[in-house]
Image (cartoon, rainbow, N blue to C red):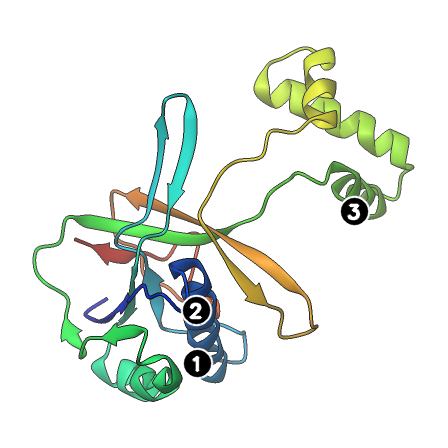
Amino acid sequence: MNYYQEITLINSIEGSLFKLWSKLFMQVHLALVEAKNNDNLVNVGISFPEYQVFEKNGKSFTILGSKLRVFANQRTELEQLDLQQKLSRLLDYVHIRSISAVPKPTKGHLTVNRFRQDGNMERLTRRYAKRKNISFERAKQEQVANYAAKHKVSIEKALESYENPKLQNHPYIIMDSLSSSNKFSLEITQTTVDQPQGGLFNTYGMSATTTVPHW
């Protein structure tokens, strides 16, 4: 990725960063939806420069930070996205830098992706049963056995994990579904990788494989 635009959220008395993230990222998402191709993919990726997940005093903490970077290979792709106009209603709460070339050299590369929790095991088991065309109980037995084999634990331990799954802690943004009136948590995982990887992104600007620069 050769060009980027950085957006900084400005915390204020009127709204917390958490609420601002929801408003900002919803507009970015809508802009990317307008730019998607026939496969619902875009050429624009994003990252969170201040993203952190860390342990302190035995507790897990997650920080999204206050900055968003939006990347593209061509300057024109960011110009066409026109974030200055798309975010015009939020200009009292965000600072948008002009489009710039990615600095060289960078510290590394990132993948930024949506994280989906496996906490609702009953729902996952019903999906598994439907896909395999088997009963719910049979599907549950197979899932427990698969977990035991994968993690090299006893069936008893696997069953305990099934009935009381440990949810991972990731930063998230509350979003409005475009297909319904429901809200959902867009959990975000950002990972450092050794080598850059080209490709496209979903309409959140995320991908499990395509990388963006990090500095």
Q: In front of the other: label 3 or label 1?
A: 1
Q: Earlier in the sequence, mark 1 or mark 2?
A: 2
The amino acid beneath tag 1 is: Ala
Q: Residue at x 44, y 48 (%)?
A: 171
Q: Is residue 103 left or right of residue 62?
A: left
The amino acid beneath tag 2 is: Phe
Q: Residue at x 37, y 22 (%)?
A: 57
**Quarter of the rendering containing residue 147:** top right
Q: Which residue is mark 2?
A: 25
Q: Alpha-carbon neighbours of circle 1 within 10 Å: few (<14), some, or many (≥20)? A: some
Q: Are marks 3 and 1 in contact (CB under 8 Å)?
A: no
Q: Which mark is residue 144?
A: none
Q: Position of residue 15 (x, y in %)?
A: 41, 66
Asked which secondary structure carries label 3, the reply is helix
Q: Which residue is mark 3?
A: 127
Q: Residue at x 78, y 28 (%)?
A: 142
Q: Are marks 2 and 3 in contact (CB under 8 Å)?
A: no
Q: Residue at x 43, y 31 (%)?
A: 60
Asked which secondary structure carries label 1, the reply is helix
The amino acid beneath tag 3 is: Arg
Q: Which mark is residue 31?
A: 1
Task: Pick out the residue farthest to the left.
Answer: 104
Q: Position of residue 27 (x, y in %)?
A: 45, 77
Q: Alpha-carbon neighbours of circle 3 within 10 Å: few (<14), some, or many (≥20)? A: some
Q: Position of residue 158 (x, y in %)?
A: 69, 19
Between the C-alphas of marks 3 and 1, the distance is 32 Å
Pick the quarter of the image with the N terminus: bottom left
Between the C-alphas of marks 2 and 3, the distance is 30 Å
**Quarter of the rendering containing residue 59:** top left
Q: Alpha-carbon neighbours of circle 2 within 10 Å: few (<14), some, or many (≥20)? A: some
